[in-house]
Image: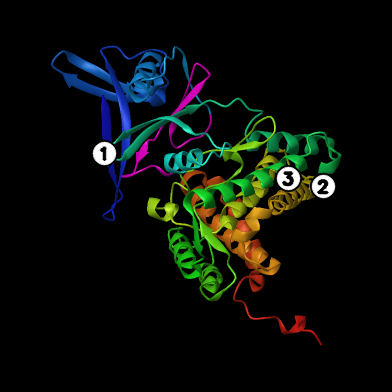
Amino acid sequence: MLAEVRADGGRGDSTWYQLPLGAASECPDELPDVAHVGRLETPRGEAHLFDALADEELALRFCSIVAPGLDVRTVRAQAGEQSNTSLVFDERYILKVFRRVQPGPNPDVEVTEALGRIGFGAVPVPVAVWRRSNTDFAVTRRYERSRGDGVELATASLREMFNRRRPPRDCKLDFAKEAYQLGRDVAALHVALAEAFGSEPADGAAWAADMTAQLHRVASGHLETQRIEEVYQRLSTADDLGRAIRIHGDLHLGQVLRLARSWMVLDFEGEPDRPVDERRRPSSPLRDVAGMTRSFHYAAGMALREMESPDRELRLLADAWAERAVNTFLSGYADVDDVHRLLPQARASRDALLSVFEMDKAVYEVAYELAHRPDLVDLPIRAVERLLDYDDELPGAPPDESDEPA
């Protein structure tokens, strides 16, 4: 059976979730505790309810419903922290079941279908979509074998550097080449998104409004909201912001897979805690770039936390690794000529706009960590404070008279 559950947020808003359920007189022993839902009285007696996707037989049956053209025989759950459920069938296909259901097309399906139609191959194009009343419930794609995702490769690079206590460039697993190629591939993705969905003039006022709304969704008392809002509002008067396109919306190292010669970009749903309409709105490609540059800093910070009592040398190495990854990523991105028509024309405007989007991303991270991993909230809070130290360089700030030519 398929249960649809509505969760009321207490402010007149509600969220819908889907839960494929199995029922049996005896609950399967091999199921993890988290898969047990409860019990239900039926005319045949008491039944145990459980997550059907956690049971191998029912998961295979579910696949035959949502992707009837596939003949599959084995299934395993994909590991990792996810807001949806992903199942790998026969090591050839991967089925993503959207737990949180939004009316209309799911952004992940919508974007990858559009990119597939123009022949862009660096994203997982759907093989089958389970859609009812124009609402997407699940999508099946080919399963890509890879060397690992960005988090895995970055973490391996950082661990080697910490163990050897050598600069990142002196390490065998130096991430610079990977970051450079990732920059090129993200730029190519943005060019393809502009082709698939078109582009439009930037709307700095609308971007500022979205950022401000997100800022006020963060619990008060953790950030200097007034100063941050002042930074955002400078977008309203900036005139060199480039073009707006459909973007990924939640780009970070966990959303990319390293294939033999390139990176594949995954999961185009956008940031799950933002409203879906906001996730679909065109924005600057630099918002995705900011997501990735923040991710390099996050990877370094997380790897440093794994070390016992990290000393000053290790902290300096972590900073050096993040700076090297950011710089080579941005260099690879800038080396794709076609992407420049989507960006601000002046280098100073590009750097300033990127800083604004990094601020917005760090604010989002504060909200996310407060809700899910409060012990990590200091990482994005420090990023916000660091970015505020340079707020006079952001768009709309008055010129510093000391920098005026004599």
Q: What is the magenta range?
A: 80-107
Mark closer to the observer (2, 1): 1
Camera sees residue 249: no
> Picture coordinates of residue 106 (x, y %)?
39, 42
Residue at the spot x=72%, y=49% of the render? Answer: 332
Nearest the eye: 263 or 38: 263
Give the structural element (helix, strand or loop) at label 3.
helix
Give the structural element (helix, strand or loop) at label 2.
helix
Distance from label 2 to label 3 (Cα)?
Answer: 26 Å
Q: As shown in the figure, which amino acid type bears the numbered disc 3?
A: Tyr
Left or right of 273? Residue 25 is: left
Residue placed under numbered mark 1 in the picture: 133
Residue placed under numbered mark 3 in the picture: 180
Give the quarter of the image for residue 160: top right
Mark sitting on residue 313: 2
Distance from label 2 to label 1 (Cα)?
Answer: 58 Å
Give the quarter of the image for residue 144: top right
